[in-house]
């Protein structure tokens, strides 16, 4: 049976969702975050980097969200949740599957990091740290995030999903960046296509079952 090493309030929710969509049996081993919101050290006993999600299947360890999605679809998908190769939808699928972690998440992590810096320094340094953090956010991170969300909006306005009109692994991969971004900026109202995307995925029974298995998660964590 597949085992999912699941860090609460994390991107690992997407893996539970995909497993539910595929109708696979699996078990969840849940890890609690520490007061500093970091993963516990015992995750390193599973994978050297101590990150989640990680799955075990057939005695082997698989890490990295995109790689796990590809492995599950290759092994158990039977052609589902992936467009036919050679099509424009497949090109879009591959792009968004890798964009989710390669382009979207680093930007969101920067925003999260700089929002937390003022609270991590001594009290007397906080005014300076706050000024630096706000400056980086307003000059560097926020303008890029605005460009990315506008890009998502234009793509989702075409078909409602990221790689055509049918749900794919790319939509599952993109769910966390979109949810995280919309939780950090007051952008959902200004982006109707993104709002519809979120309503669509959250209404899926498999998405809801994944929440029941892993517990509700806060999008602003990583």
Image: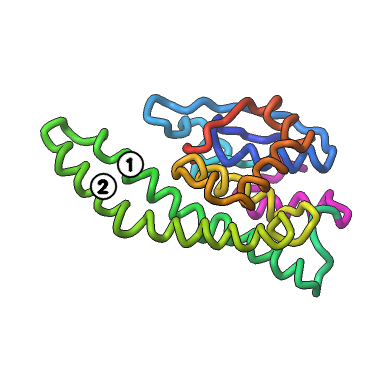
Image quadrant in which you'd find residue 185: top left
Q: Position of residue 112 (x, y in %)?
A: 39, 43
Classify mark 2: residues with Cα within 10 Å, few (<14), some (14-19) or many (20+).
some
Sequence-earlier tag: 2 or 1:
1
Describe the element under mark 1 as helix, strand or loop: helix
Q: Is residue 35 above or below residue 95?
A: above
Left or right for 141, reference 213:
left
Q: Which residues are magenta?
A: 56-79
Q: Is residue 212 above or below residue 186?
A: above
Q: Which mark is residue 133?
A: 2
Left or right for 6, reference 122:
right
Q: Position of residue 177 (x, y in %)?
A: 55, 48
Q: Position of residue 192 (x, y in %)?
A: 61, 50
- Residue reaching furthest to the left: 124
Question: Residue at 38% of width from left, 50% of height from top?
Answer: 110
Q: Are marks 2 and 1 in contact (CB under 8 Å)?
A: yes
Magenta-drawn stretch contains 69: yes
């Amino acid at each position: 049976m597949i085992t999912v090493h699941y860090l609460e309030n994390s991107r690992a929710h997407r893996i539970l969702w995909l497993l539910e969509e595929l109708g696979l049996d699996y078990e969840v081993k849940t890890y609690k975050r520490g007061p500093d919101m970091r993963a516990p050290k015992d995750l390193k006993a599973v994978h050297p980097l101590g990150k989640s999600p990680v799955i075990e299947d057939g005695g082997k360890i698989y890490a990295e969200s995109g790689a796990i999605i590809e492995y599950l679809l290759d092994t158990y998908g039977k052609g589902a949740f992936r467009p036919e190769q050679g099509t424009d939808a497949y090109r879009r699928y591959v792009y968004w599957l890798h964009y989710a972690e390669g382009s979207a998440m680093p930007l969101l992590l920067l925003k999260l990091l700089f929002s937390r810096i003022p609270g991590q320094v001594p009290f007397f340094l906080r005014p300076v740290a706050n000024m630096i953090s706000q400056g980086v956010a307003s000059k560097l991170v926020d303008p890029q995030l605005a460009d990315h969300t506008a890009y998502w909006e234009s793509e989702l306005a075409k078909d409602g999903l990221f790689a055509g009109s049918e749900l794919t692994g790319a939509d599952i991969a993109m769910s966390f960046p979109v949810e995280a971004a919309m939780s950090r900026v007051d952008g959902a109202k200004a982006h109707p296509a993104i709002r519809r995307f979120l309503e669509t995925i959250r209404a899926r029974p498999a998405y809801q079952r994944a929440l029941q298995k892993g517990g509700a998660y806060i999008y602003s964590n990583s």
